[in-house]
Image (tube, helix red, strand yellow):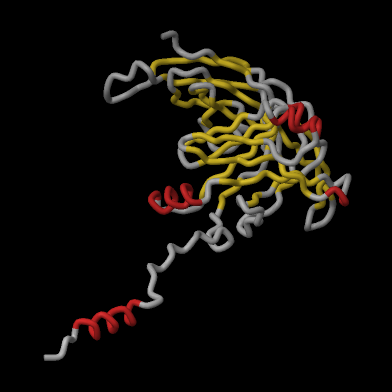
Amino acid sequence: MKNWAPIIFVILLSLGCGRRTPPVPRLDLNQHLMPLKVAAPYYKDQWLVFTWALAQEDPKERAHLASEIDHFRLYIGEPNCPSCGAQGAGWVKISGDGLSLTPGELDQQKTQALAEARAYRFKDSYTLELPPDFVEAAPEFTLEYRTIDGSKNPASVPLVVQRPGNLPVPKLLNHRFTPAQCDFPCPDRRRLAIKWEPLLEREVTRIDPQGGVYSDRLYYGLTLYSLIEGVEHPLNEGSIYTGALDIEVGPEPIWIHYSDRFGNLSAPLVLEGLSP
């Protein structure tokens, strides 16, 4: 009787020859760049504020992408020196609920100023605040996003920073806190009623499409924030120009800023929170 074992062994060996477990494909950063929702940079009491959010609507998809691609680089381009090229202001890394910032290819003066920068996360948005010393070290610049491998995100565009004038601190005609009207006990809620005199920012001359010219008066707007654990959270969308506002707020201190037409904010007027 013929022994088939060696023949079967050879056949099985030939079938398995050259077969390996396929490698796990590596993430191609250039094909998986996160779409971004980027707000225009603005100044807040001489600090430059930069905010963005991931554009994915599905929370699971957003969390997955954030874990795979969690680095963005802030680039500084100086128009006064076209031959200088863009300089990297540092890696902005999403890490859990916060951000970490590592200085990049900057001169010593800017690197020292960047050490005071603040970065934090609120829900799905991210905020980076650059200190006045950094702003003074880079008089003019634009901001754009790059991925960890240096590729520019095609979903974002360079954003030009509009420098503010001397924004004054708001002055209220009067303000009053009263208990909030709730359907259930809410001792930590209150109503804030404020009145202020609208302050003229500038007067400009515009051309009327129907002929002639006319004068347009532009006023500073008012914006309100609640201060929670050292971070300002907006209480109103956009700026208010009416001269009066009635709004429900929490127990935290309220910071009130004037805002110009570029969204830059003045130093705050602080209304104290409830006593603990």
Q: Compare residues 86 and 47 and report the one nearer the observer.
A: 86
Q: Compare residues 224 and 116 and report the one nearer the observer.
A: 116
**Is 79 placed left or right of 135 in the picture?**
right
Q: In this view, does 201 lie above or below 32?
A: above
Instruction: Name the residue rendered at 63%, 25% in the picture.
Output: 257
Q: In which quarter of the image is residue 214?
A: top right
Q: Where is residue 23 in the image (x, y as percent from the top left)?
A: 43, 65
Instruction: Name the residue rendered at 63%, 22% in the picture.
Output: 196
**Is 62 placed left or right of 114 in the picture?**
left
Pick the quarter of the image with the C terminus.
top left
Instruction: Name the residue rendered at 31%, 78% in the picture.
Output: 13
Q: Position of residue 212 (x, y in %)?
A: 84, 52
**Is 160 placed left or right of 5 in the picture?**
right
Q: Is residue 8 above or below residue 116?
A: below
Of all residues shown, which one is farthest toward the bottom?
A: 1
Q: In this view, does 112 lie above or below 125?
A: above
Q: Position of residue 10 (x, y in %)?
A: 29, 82
Of all residues shown, which one is farthest toward the left?
A: 1
Q: In which quarter of the image is residue 215?
A: top right
Pick the quarter of the image with the N terminus.
bottom left
Q: Position of residue 18 (x, y in %)?
A: 40, 76
Of all residues shown, which one is farthest toward the front?
A: 1
Circle count: 0
Instruction: Name the residue rendered at 43%, 22% in the picture.
Output: 250
Q: Compare residues 221 and 76 and report the one nearer the observer.
A: 76
Q: Compare residues 181 and 59 and report the one nearer the observer.
A: 59
